[in-house]
Image (tube, rainbow, N blue to C red):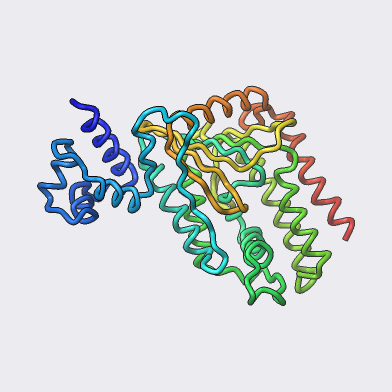
Amino acid sequence: MDQTSTIQKAIFNLIKEKLSPNISLVNEIAEVLDLGNDSAYRRIRGDKPLTLEELFKLKSHYGISIDTFFGDTGNSVTFESSLIEPEKFEVSDWIEKIVGDLTLISYAKEKEIVYVAKDPPLFHYFQLPEIAAFKVFFWEKTLFQFPEYEEKKFDPDDIDSDVFKKGQKALAIASKIPTIEIWNENTFRILLSQIEYYWICGYFIKKDHLKNLLDKMEKWIMHIQKEAELGFKYLYGHDPEGIENTYQLYFNEVVFNDNTILVKTERGYAAYLTFNVLSLLNTTNQKFCADLDKYFRGLIKKSTLISHTGAKERIRFFNEQLNEVRLFRKRI
């Protein structure tokens, strides 16, 4: 088998990984390339080389990094950019894309997510509607500065039900994917700082909303602590059911994290780097991802496991977070 045919098959394997199991790869490729099924099958099998135009169509349609398949390209790594543009941003659409990505990961036989967290991973916010409501409001008012939010104040009942339902769907899927999270002492403080900033600026409609949010934040922290104790994630308010040791939480005292995500399946790696808070750069460059994996494994060795085992360190870590909330409550 020549190298061109091998690379071509690898490209189609990656595309197949991106599709739901119930979708026919042949029918999909035939539609994207405007070919008959026989012609599409010959390309998938490697009998017929792809033209440059066809390669470009596949790259654009599926957002794949072609340089990944052409061996070591030195220090050059190609990233796909998912830049969030405030004037076009819809939280519902953004979360729906995340649901789609998580669904594809969940289809893999072997899978793992490593999340080096600067602030709590997105999925955690949707455990409680009040926490999700505040975070979404913060994105829309402060991060993207939507004009209609200029004079608007926070109301916990204001969250779009569609956004919360999609967020809970993302949470439910993510909870079933084996995950390693690496946090530091500032991971929770970012959210608390945002809440305090809103209080000082007068962005709460009434003080009771702030008190209620702090109550929910305490419950939220205690829920994550329980997940860490059990070693699996589950939905708040539900019976704790899950697969043991599918959630590993580490505490790192010396490295300030940057919200980098590494996905590993039996078909290879994918890496996601955040910028501008919610925008993403992603790559399937296997050398880059392998180097990132090596760094993460080294970081894990220098971190303290506070899930499942490590009760003393786990209690200390979460008590410190709860104490921060209670101290803020006293200040107001």
Q: Residue at x 80, y 64 (%)?
A: 199
Along the viewing direction, whichever of 247 and 148 lies nearer the viewer: 148
Residue drawn at the location 74% of the way across and 57% of the way down? 194
Q: Residue furthest left?
A: 38
User: Which part of the image, by quadrant, shows the N terminus?
Assistant: top left
Residue 322 in picture, x, y percent from top left: 77, 46
> Position of 17 compared to 130: left or right?
left
Q: Determine which quarter of the picture holds residue 200.
A: bottom right
The residue that appears at 72% across and 46% down in the rendered structure is 188
In the rendered image of this protein, does residue 211 appear above or below residue 148? above
Query: Eyeballing the image, is 159 above or below 224?
Result: below
Is 76 situated left or right of 117 in this image? Answer: left
Residue occupying image coordinates x 62% and y 57%: 128
Total labels: the figure holds: 0
In the foreground, 180 or 25: 25
Q: Of 262 and 224, which appears nearest the observer?
A: 262
Hey, which quadrant is residue 110 in on the image?
top left
Spot occupied by residue 323 in the image (x, y as percentages of width and height): 82, 45
Q: Residue 19 versus residue 66: which sits nearer the camera?
A: 66
Task: Point out the image quarter for the C terminus.
Answer: bottom right
Residue 74 lies, in percent from the top left, at 46, 28
Q: Quadrant of residue 229?
A: top right
Residue 46 coordinates in the image, percent (x, y)? 18, 36
